[in-house]
């Protein structure tokens, strides 16, 4: 199927205006053929890049919203929150549960141990569990 797609793209490129939108798309496909075939050689790679596109879209939409953060401090706070939520997603953690637990714990948590509460480390200290004393 993949070979057929690239044969089709090469054939269609001969009859489509190069400066048209379709011409641009076909040129892109031809120029990226080796990269677009990587999933065939590496079974662990998805055939699509939907996750990457979704992450980029969130940044683009967020950028427009950040213009109205009111202050540089507000923008930094928003960036920190987006980072925590993104880290939760990467760790497979529900951001709402994580942030709720984090906000309850931070008030009394020792400052020298806050690294234990990053999303990656938080899994060991889920709500209802007490972290080990150090």
Image (cartoon, helix red, strand yellow):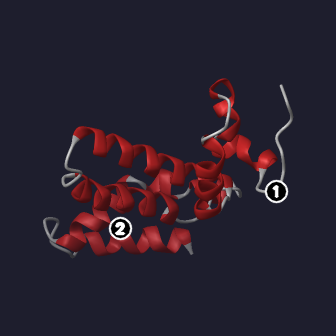
Q: Quadrant of the N terminus?
A: bottom right
Q: Give the left or right position of residue 38, taking residue 92 as reference.
A: left
Q: Is the residue under label 2 in contact with that under label 1 (CB below 8 Å)?
A: no
Mark 1 or mark 2, which is nearer to you? 1
How many marks are shown on the rendered structure?
2
The residue to which callout 1 is attached is 128
| Place of residue 113 in the rendered image (x, y in percent of width and height, measured from the top left) | 69, 28
Q: Is residue 6 above or below residue 126?
A: below
Q: Residue at x 53, y 68 (%)?
A: 3
In the foreground, 102 or 33: 102
Disc 2 crowd rating (10 Å Cα; few below 14, some 14-19, many 20+) is some
In the foreground, 36 or 63: 63
* SS of the residue under disc 1: loop
Mark 1 and mark 2 lie on one chain; the one further toward the N terminus is 2
Q: Quadrant of the C terminus?
A: top right
Disc 1 crowd rating (10 Å Cα; few below 14, some 14-19, many 20+) is few
Spatial CA span between label 1 and label 2? 60 Å
| Place of residue 102 in the rendered image (x, y in percent of width and height, measured from the top left) | 62, 49
In the foreground, 30 or 124: 124
Q: Give the left or right position of residue 17, taking residue 32 as reference.
A: left
| Place of residue 19 in the rendered image (x, y in percent of width and height, measured from the top left) | 13, 65
The residue to which callout 2 is attached is 10
């Amino acid at each position: 199927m993949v070979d057929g797609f690239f044969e089709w793209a090469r054939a269609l490129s001969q009859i489509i205006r190069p400066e048209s939108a379709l011409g641009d798309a076909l040129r892109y496909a031809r120029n990226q053929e080796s990269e677009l075939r990587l999933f065939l050689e590496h079974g662990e790679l998805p055939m699509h890049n939907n996750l990457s596109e979704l992450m980029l879209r969130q940044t683009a939409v967020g950028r427009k919203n950040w213009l109205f953060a009111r202050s540089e401090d507000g923008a930094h706070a928003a960036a920190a929150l987006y980072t925590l939520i993104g880290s939760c997603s990467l760790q497979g953690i529900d951001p709402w549960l994580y942030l709720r637990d984090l906000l309850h714990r931070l008030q009394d948590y020792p400052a020298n141990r806050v690294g234990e509460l990053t999303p990656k480390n938080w899994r060991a200290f889920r709500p209802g569990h007490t972290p080990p004393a150090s």
